[in-house]
Image (cartoon, helix red, strand yellow):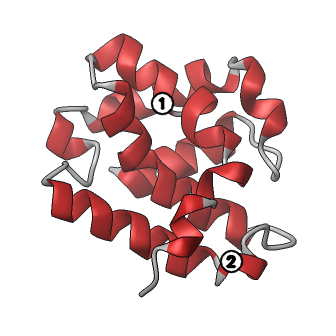
Amino acid sequence: MTIAPCSWASRATAARSADSVNPLTAKFGIVHGRAVGIMLPHVVRYNASVGDNPYADLGGGEEIAGCIEGFLAAAGFPATLSACGVPVGALPELALEAAKQWTATFNPVPVRESELLEIYRSAF
């Protein structure tokens, strides 16, 4: 596994910060960087699975997501929302809040509440 693709992973992942991370920090106090780490592999996989793969020139979404997960494990970061104490019942509310974030328009794949809920569930 190379680390070069990971350095560019965030160029096409607006959903990771704006949409999915801000509500986690606001509602559960998860440090922003940890929330980004937890959500980013799932956003990358989602973006790569819908339409044109924005990561194709970097090795593909799965390679990038796996690289990010490797970094999280090496750093001892939690890998799931449940490991951070987020209850499964909170996911719909998080998706609703995330859908209101203005930066969602920068994600390379359109995301609405239903897609964000799918991403949160994959991170749970």
Pinpoint residue 5: horizontal percent, then vertical percent.
58, 72
Residue type at mark 1 is Val
Asked where in the image residue 106 lies, by quadrant, the reply is top right
Query: Is 38 rendered above or below residue 58?
Result: above
Relative to the observer, which residue lies in front, 42 or 17?
17
Extreme-top residue of the structure: 26
**Badge 2: few (under 14), some or many (20 or more) residues near its Cα, within 10 Å?**
some
- x 61%, y 59%: residue: 9
- Point out the frontmost of discs 2 and 1: 2
Pinpoint residue 7: horizontal percent, then vertical percent.
55, 60
Distance from the alpha carbon under mark 2 to that under mark 1:
24 Å
User: On the rendered structure, is 71 left or right of 121?
Assistant: left
Relative to the observer, which residue lies in front, 8 or 12?
8
Question: Decide: marks 2, 1 in contact (CB < 8 A)?
Answer: no
Residue position marked by numbered label 1 in the rendering: 21
Query: Is 44 rendered above or below residue 81?
Result: below
Residue 93 seen from this side:
no
Mark 2 element type: helix
- x 53%, y 34%: residue: 20
Residue 49 seen from this side:
yes
Q: Earlier in the sequence, mark 2 or mark 1?
A: 1
Pinpoint residue 87: horizontal percent, then vertical percent.
24, 33
Residue position marked by numbered label 2 in the rendering: 58
Residue type at mark 2 is Leu
Query: Is 62 rendered above or below residue 48?
Result: below
Locate the N terminus by quadrant.
Answer: bottom left
**Badge 1: few (under 14), some or many (20 or more) residues near its Cα, within 10 Å?**
many
Mark 1 element type: helix
Asked where in the image residue 103 lies, by quadrant, the reply is top right
